[in-house]
Each structure stands twice: as C-alpha cells, then as structure tokens.
Amino acid sequence: MHLRKRRKRKGILFLFILALLFGLYLYKENTTIGVTFVEVKAAGLPESFNHFRIVQLSDVHDSEFGDNHLELVNKVKILSPDAIFITGDFIDRNRYDLEQSLEIVKQLQGVAPFYFVTGNHEISTNDVERIKKELVELGVHILTNEAIMIDNEQGEQIAVGGIEDPLSSNLDEKEYVEQVLDNTFKDVPNDIYKVLLSHRPEQFEVYVDRQIDLVFSGHAHGGQIRIPGIGGLVAPGQGWFPKYTSGVHELDKTSMVVSRGLGNSIVPLRVFNRPEVIVVTLKIN
C-alpha cells in the first residue's frame, strides 16, 4: 500500500514537471522572434537586383517586442534589408493601439524603405484612413490597388504592387482580388518583374493566373497550432488543415511567401509555431 502511494506521488510529480516544462516552452515560443531566411530564384529579375534583400513583417496585431520593440528592431537592423514589407494586420481591432505599432516604423526609420498593405484588421477598425495617414507621415509607401517602381542606380526596375484587403469590398473575395489585380499592374510592362503584397494567401491561384512573379502574404498565423509533419491546424479563409500557412509555395512562374506572422489576435497562443521575421533574398534564376 505504501509503495503504491509513493508511485502515485512520483507520477503526479512527473506530470507536474512535464506540464511546467511545456508551459515554459510555450511561453518562450510565443514571446521570442525567429528569423526565417528564404532564397527565391527569380526568372526575369534584372541583374542589378540580384541579392536584393526584403524583410517581411506580417500580422503584428499590436504586439509588443520589448521596450520600444527593441528585440524586433535590432533583428531587422542586423539584417540590413533593401526593403521592408508590411503585409497587413499591423494593428488589432480587439486591442487597437496604433501608436504602439507605429513605434516599430519609427524605430526603423532610415533602415530601408517601407511598403504597406492593409489586412482585415485595419479595415474592420473603420479607422483605416487615419492608419494610412500616420504611416504616410512616417514615409511608408501605402499600396492601395496600385504598383510603384523600385529603381536602382543602374537604371533597372522592378514593380511592387499591393492590394487592399477584400474586407473593404462587398464582392466575393476571389472576384474582388481578380478585379483589383487587373487594375494594380495595368500600367506595368509585361517584361517587368512583378512583386505583390497581398494579405490573403488563399487566393494563390488568382495570383498565378495573373502571372505575378512573387507574392508576399500572411493572415494564416501559421495555422495557429502546427502539427509536426502535417502543418497548420486552422486558418481564416482556409478552414481546417489549411494549405497555405508558412513557407514558399510555387506554381508555374509564381512564388508566394507566406509569413507565420508576429502576433496573435482572438486566439492568444501559438503551439510549435514561433513568431517570425522573414528575410527573402532574390536570386537570378
């Protein structure tokens, strides 16, 4: 009887230690930032843009990353990007704190040009014009169903376009993306390398159909809970066991980079799904 009690106590202690270690692991996974390095072989990329480096920040959701976002800011500075892309949900409609997120941009002034597109959270605040105005005042390029050219010293160019999140329209999501993409690159010559910022990865087939060279997306939060060997568990717009939650997806001439994002929204916890900064280096194919 005494031996049985000792075994029971040991079992309870083991489970307690196991739960404590898992809790510490989850805390670390949700409060520290990883950096993911990606190389994209880019057919049609001008030679002078070989090794062009892009940092992608997605789905910040008004999260904090140390005092004045020091952890995030220092990681980005060390990476020495040529451009910084913010691919939507920079703020969170449930704990809206624009000044807190703007501090990231303020701390990274002068590091590289910023390019921004809205996500569903910006639209749903009903404060999107103020958000854009504040970002413009900090020198951020706002891309609202339009493309601009990035020129370099060698006189070569690539086009960077961005589309407003579909929540801004009453149209079906796929129909909306088709329509605005036709408009976004209408003035860009066919032989120019085209980069698209679009919050929603589930529209990958539309991006492929419109022959976009490279897409940067987010929204899926990595599937929130990542199951080893399987991938993400659930994502908005894709449902259970979503296809596009992380990494690089390729079809025909189109590559799409999907960020797991940095923050959380309604679901406050990630599992096996560390917040990430993505660094994409373009390489001539």
Image (tube, rainbow, N blue to C red):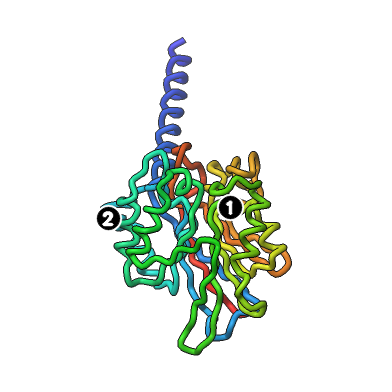
Tell me if mark 2 has few (under 14), some (14-19) or many (20+) residues whose alpha carbon lies within 10 angstroms of its own: some
Question: On screen, 254 above or below 13?
Answer: below
Tally of numbered discs: 2
Please identify, in this view, whether the residue under mark 2 or under mark 1 is nearer the observer: 1
Residue at 64% from the left image edge and 44% from the top image edge? 238
Horizontal side of 197 relative to 35 (left or right) equals: right
Residue 285 in view (yes/no): no
Which amino acid type is shown beneath numbered disc 2? Asn
Where is residue 234 shown, x and y percent of the image? Answer: 60, 40
Q: Residue 253 falls in which quadrant of the image? A: bottom right
Query: Which residue was labeled with disc 1?
Result: 200
Which amino acid type is shown beneath numbered disc 1? Arg
Horizontal side of 118 relative to 212 (left or right) equals: left
**Mark sitting on residue 68:** 2
Residue at 65% from the left image edge and 67% from the top image edge? 212
Residue at 44% from the left image edge and 29% from the top image edge? 14
Residue 183 in view (yes/no): yes
**Which is more toward the observer, 215 or 143?**
143
Residue at 36% from the left image edge and 43% from the top image edge? 96
Which numbered disc, 2 or 1, marks the residue that appears first in the sequence? 2
Where is residue 136 shown, x and y percent of the image? Answer: 37, 63
Q: What element carries label 1?
A: loop
Q: Which residue lies furthest to the left in this view?
A: 67
